[in-house]
Image (spheres, rainbow, N blue to C red):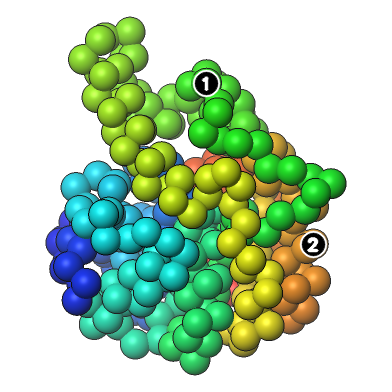
Amino acid sequence: MKWQEVETKKGTRCRVLEGGSGAPVVFFHGAGGLLHDNPFLDQLAQRYHVFAPEWPGYGESAGEELLEDMLDFTLHGWDLVEALGLEQPHLVGHSMGGMIAAEMACLAPHDLAKLVLVSPAGLWMDEHPIPDIFALLPYQIAEVLFHDPQRGQALLTGGADLSDMEALKEFYIGSQRRLAMAGKILFPIPNRRLSKRLYRLTAESLVLWGASDRLIVPAYAERWKTLIPPARVEVINDAGHMLPYEQSDKFVRSVAGFLR
């Protein structure tokens, strides 16, 4: 897969990881951004034409000052689809990206093919409060996001030696920039009343969840199922919130089986 840069009508400039051929699939990443290695995207690109944009404020994408609220993020998603020249792509969103993809599907229900939501944010259940990721210490993040925190820590840092001060500084600055952007729609709690709009969602939908998700627990999968009755729900073992990274093969198998 290769990087390209696109500019939207609003003026944001976004890097997009692109590869493969076939039906278009747009993948929207979560609050942590794309990692150094994204093997599930490579696997999806063996079956589909995959586009994985970085949100403004992530990596080399710019224009974060132009996105202020949930509607801005949602419209930006469709602006990206237009800038890429796509018509009725499949949308796949993980965590924060799942929340945005669901909003996109509510706003323009006939402009996408199928929808895959992977441990999506966007709902709130008082009996299962979602931890405040902005209050977590660095060593706590992997424990919340991964079934295997030790392996997860290595994935998050891309193998960088954080005992090196320059590497630690670079990692910290990047993390703060990403969280500042995500905070616009996730802080203090990831609830922007999406549940009131889900009645508009008509796309055939798949909801995927990691059985060991400690950030947004699997009980939320059933809540999505209640709000989108036709949706198919799959819970995958030995995976936490970062399901696409921990169980890439199972993730791709489920997505491909649904999209075909």
Query: x, y (%) of residue 193?
Result: 64, 66
For mark 1, give the secondary structure: loop
Name the residue carrying label 1: 137
Q: Is residue 1 visible?
A: no
Compute the Cα span from label 2 to label 1: 30 Å
Where residue 189 appears, x then y in whole percent? 61, 47
Q: What's the amino acid at mark 1? A: Leu
Identify residue for label 2.
222
Residue 137 place in picture, x, y as percent: 52, 21
Q: Is residue 71 above or below residue 118?
A: below
Tell me what residue is drawn at x 27 percent, y 54 percent.
64
The quadrant holding residue 48 is bottom left
Position of the N terminus by quadrant? bottom left
Residue at figure coordinates x 27%, y 81% from the top left: 82
Type of residue at label 2?
Glu
Q: Position of residue 234 (x, y in %)?
A: 71, 61
In the rendered view, tell whether residue 234 sits above or below residue 84.
above
The mark nearer the N terminus, 2 or 1, is 1
Q: Residue at x 41, y 39 (%)?
A: 179
Which of 190/209 is in front? 190
Lateral position of residue 12 relative to residue 147, left or right: left
Q: Residues within 10 Å of mark 2 (few under 14, many from 20)?
A: few
Q: Residue furthest bottom?
A: 110
Which residue reaches farthest right? 127
Quarter assignment of residue 54: bottom left
Dot 2: element: helix
Q: Which mark is residue 129?
A: none
Q: Is residue 49 left or right of residue 112?
A: left
